[in-house]
Image (cartoon, rainbow, N blue to C red):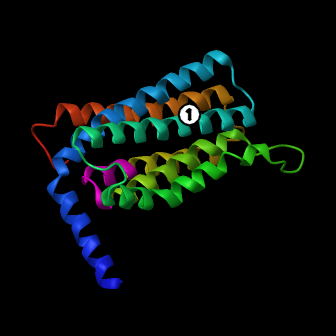
Amino acid sequence: MESHWAVEHLQVIRTLMERTALYRRALAPIMLAIGLLGLAAAVAAWILRIDSSRSFSLFWGGVALAGLGVAFRLIRRQAGQESEPFWSPPTRRVTQAMLPAMAAGLITVLLPCLPCGSDPLPAWWLPPIWMVLYGASVHAAGFFMPRGIKLFGWIFVAAGSAALLALGSCSSPPPIRIAHLLMGAVFGGFHAAYGAYLYLTESRSPTA
C-alpha cells in the first residue's frame, strides 16, 4: 500500500512539473472569472444595502460557493478540452490541500447567525479571517501548482493580518457597507489582477 501511494505521489509531482505552463494558462480564466464575480458582488451588495451582520455573512458565503462552482466548471471544461479526466490525481491533490482552510472559512459564515449574548458576531471580523484562511488555502495548493500561487496566498495572509490589526486598533468599526468594498477590492481585485498578469506574461514566464 505504501509503495503504491509513493508511486502515485511521484507521478502526480512529475505530471505537475511537466504541465506547469498548461496549468498556468488554465489559472488565468479562473482568476479573472472569480475576480469579476467578486467585484460584481461588492457593487450589488452596495446597491442592495446589505447592512446587517447576518445578511453580510450569508451573502458573501453564497458568493464564495458560486466562485467555487465557477472554478470547478472551468476546470472541468479545460479537462475536457485536453481529453483528460476531471477528477485526476493532480486535481485531487490540490483539492485536498485547500480543503481544511476552505472548510474553516465556510464554517465561519455561520458565526453571525449564532447568538453571542444579545448580539451576533460583528460582520467586520469576517473579511480579515476569510482573507487569512483563503490565503492559507491557496498557499497549500501552491505546493502542487506554479510557484506564483504561494506568493498569491501570502498576499492574502498579509492583507488579512493587516486588516485584523487595523480593526483591533479601531474604537468602532466602519459601516458594513465599507466591508463590502473591502471584500470586492481584495477578493475581486486581487483575483482579477492576478488573472490579467497571467495573461500578459504567459509567453514570457511559464513558471511564474
Within the magenta stretch, is there residue 152?
yes
Q: In screen coordinates, is 193 left or right of 24?
A: right
Q: Secondary structure under badge 1?
A: helix
Is residue 150 on the magenta stretch?
Answer: yes
Q: Quadrant of residue 112?
A: top right
Compared with 65, 36 (above or below) is above
Residue 198 point in image, percent of width and height? 23, 37
Residue depicted at 45% across the width and 31% down the height: 188
Q: Quadrant of the N terminus?
A: bottom left
The residue beneath circle 1 is 63
Q: Is residue 46 above or below residue 139?
A: above
Q: Is residue 101 above or below residue 195?
A: below
Residue name at image x 51 percent, y 52 percent: 132
Where is residue 41? Give x, y as percent: 54, 25
Q: Picture quarter containing residue 109?
A: top right
| Mark 1 residue type | Val
- SS assignment for the magenta stretch, majority: helix
- At x 59%, y 29%, the residue is 180
User: Residue 102, image x and y in percent?
Assistant: 52, 53
Which residue sits furthest top? 47
Q: Judge left or right: residue 28 versus residue 57.
A: left
Q: Nearer the viewer, residue 189 or 38?
A: 38
Residue 53 position, x and y percent, is 73, 36
Q: What is the residue that sits farthest to the left in this orientation?
A: 204
The span shown in magenta is 143-153
Task: Report the front residue among 110 and 65.
Answer: 65
**46 is higher (above) or lower (below) than 179:** above
Q: Residue at coordinates 31% horizontally, 50% vertically from top-left?
A: 85
